[in-house]
Each structure stands twice: as structure tokens, then as C-alpha cells.
Amino acid sequence: MLARRAVFLALALLIAVFLTGLILGATGYIDTIISSIIDEEVRAYRQALSSSPQKPPPDELNRLVEQRKQELIAYWGMDKPWQARIIPMILNTLILNLGKTPSPEVANVAGLMPNSLISDIIAACLPRTIFMITLAEAIVILIALVVGPFVVYRIGSLIDRFIVAYAAIMNAFPIWWIALVMLLVFSYSFGVAPRQFRPVVTHINALLSGDITAFAGVLNYVWLPIITIIIVLSGPWIYSIRAMLIRIVKEDFVTAAMARGLPEKQILRRYIIRPAASPIVTNVLLGLAGTIGGYIITESVFDWPGMGTLYYAAVTSGDAQTILALTYVFTLVYVIARFILEVLYVVLDPRVRL
């Protein structure tokens, strides 16, 4: 059974990458973006030549501009049809040959130069997202796993009604909007948080190099984004755990256990959490796996150069190779998480073996 699931998940990975590449090429999206970039660079080049003290004659000016345009067309690969550009990219991506990025915007997110290896760019941006998004999500999950079971025994109480209302309110507010409010209050009004967050890169790089003292610098930049994410996501996560457990609480075997006078902790551990372990583990693993992609708008609000910002830069600059590489990485993480879940289902629920 696990082998069959592994094959299906591998097929899903292949389909995701192929569809992404075909959509980018066949719709003309990449060509439109790159053509706009080329036109803008050619316009700026013509303006620079025209305003220079050694302004060339009109014929020479047109020749230099056309030469520059052809260089840009060759640099971006626009002298070939989209099939000749995208299909080799897809095949190389599938064998983990992620290639290089021609986009200065994409390279700038990682603090590297254009034509840098995309694998190096991802390796630079991924820890930054883990330090902010993944860490915050892990804290939220821990809070939910503690508070959710506590609340499920007190359905209808004041704290239960508060959790339900809090979850509903937080579902109505996007994280990036709360992030803007937090920046206004803590960075600009009180001045207790940084106004610019990109310098965190220096501290993260130092910490990854083994400098433990850099942790204080990372903490100085990361605490506000983490608190923002916790505020927004804690309510929905607690409500989700509550919803998973509340159905189990009403089962007859739980009522019987309560009637026998078993301790609350024992009932919670053996009769409630264990039957609900599969959906809880599913939410936790897929939730953590999803954070690898980052939060595009939230990272932009904090000017956080992570995976979300990287994806945005790749899309807006028409960097098909980086888009394919990121799609492959995100889908691969999801596929691995799903396969781990398939294994855990067998462990957590022996009925799955049948």
C-alpha cells in the first residue's frame, strides 16, 4: 500500500512541475513579462545615450540601441520559442538541476549576483523563512495542542466562547493587515521594534556559521513577526483542534470512561486524543510543510527576504527557471510530508492496515 501511495505522490510531483511549466509558457505570461523588462531596459539605455555628453549620431544611436536589445533578447532566451526554453527547464528541474537565475531581482532577495545558482539562492532564503514563518507556526501549534484539549472539556464555558469568538475575529483579518498595525504601533509609535528587517540576514548568516552570540540579534528582528503570526493563527488553530476533539468527547466510550471515574488526564490521553491523533497529525505536518513556501505579502510587509519574497520576485520578473525550481521544492516538501503521514497512519491507527 505504501509503495502504491509513493508512486501516486511521485506522479503528483511530476504533474505539478509539468503543468506549471506549460502554463508559464503556453499562456505567454513569461514572454509578456520579459518583453516588458527588455523594452524598459532598452528605453533606459537609449535615454542614457541621448543624455550623455558624447551623444552619438542618430544612426549610431539606433545601431547601439538595437545591438543592446538583441543582447537582452539572447540573455533572456527570447530568441527561441517557449517550447525550446520551458521544456528543457522542466526536465532539468526534475533531475534537480535547478540552473541559474538571470533575474537581478531574484538574486537580490538572496543577496547574490545575477546568474547565481538557484540552489544557492534557495539555500540562502529558506533558513530566513524557517526562523520566522515555520518557527511561529510551530509555536502556534504547540499552543493549540495545549489549549484545545483543555477547552474541549469545557464546551459552553466562558473560555470556550472566547476561543470561538477569537477564532472568528482572527479569520476575518489577514496576517499582513495585522502586521501593518503591529509595525505602526511597535516600530513607529513605541520604537521598540526595528523599522527595517532586512539586516536580520547578517545575524542569521552569523548564527548558521556557529556564532551563538548572533542569536540575540536574530531575536531582536524576529520577535515582532512571530508575535504577529501567533496572534492571528492561534485562534483558528485552537478552534480546529477543538473541533477535532469535540466529536470524540461525545462518543459512548468516553462517557463510559467518565462514568467509571477515571482521571481527566487519562481519559484525555487514552480515549480522546488517541482516536483523534490521525487528523491532528495531518494538520500539524501539512501546516508545517506549508510554511516552507513562506507568506508572500506578510514577508513583503516586514521586508523579510525569505521564500515568499523570493517567489514574488520570480513571478514579477518572469524568471521561469526559479518559478519551476520553487514549485518543485514546495511540492516535494508536500509529497514527503504526505508520505510520512501515510506511514504514521499505519502506526497511529492499526485499522488502516486492513
Image (spheres, rainbow, N blue to C red):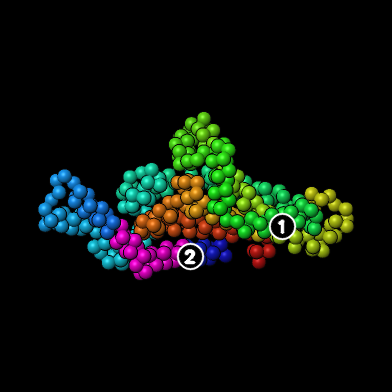
Which quadrant would residue 22 be assigned to in this image?
A: bottom left
Of marks 1 and 2, which one's residue comes earlier in the chain? 2
Tag of residue 94: none
Q: Residue at x 51, y 38 (%)?
A: 194
Question: Residue, x 64% and y 55% (percent of image)?
Answer: 170
Q: Amino acid at mark 2?
A: Ala
Mark 1, secondary structure of its residue: helix
Please identify the quarter of the rendering in which residue 34 is found: bottom left
Tell me, yes or no, whether the highlighted magenta stretch contains residue 28.
yes
Q: Is residue 93 in sight in this rendering?
A: no
Expressed as whole percent of the image width and height from the top left, the position of residue 93 reads: 38, 58
Residue drawn at (35%, 69%) of the image: 26
Quadrant occupied by the N terminus: bottom right
Please state the total of marks drawn on the protein image.
2
Residue type of the residue flagged with mark 1: Val
Q: Is residue 137 left or right of residue 94?
A: right
Q: Nearer the viewer, residue 181 or 92?
A: 181
> Residue under circle 2?
12
Residue holding disc 1? 164
Q: Write the start and end of the magenta stretch as one range.
A: 13-37
The secondary structure type at the circle numbered 2 is helix
Query: The C terminus is located in which quarter?
Result: bottom right
Could you tell me which residue is drawn at 36 percent across and 44 percent down? 112
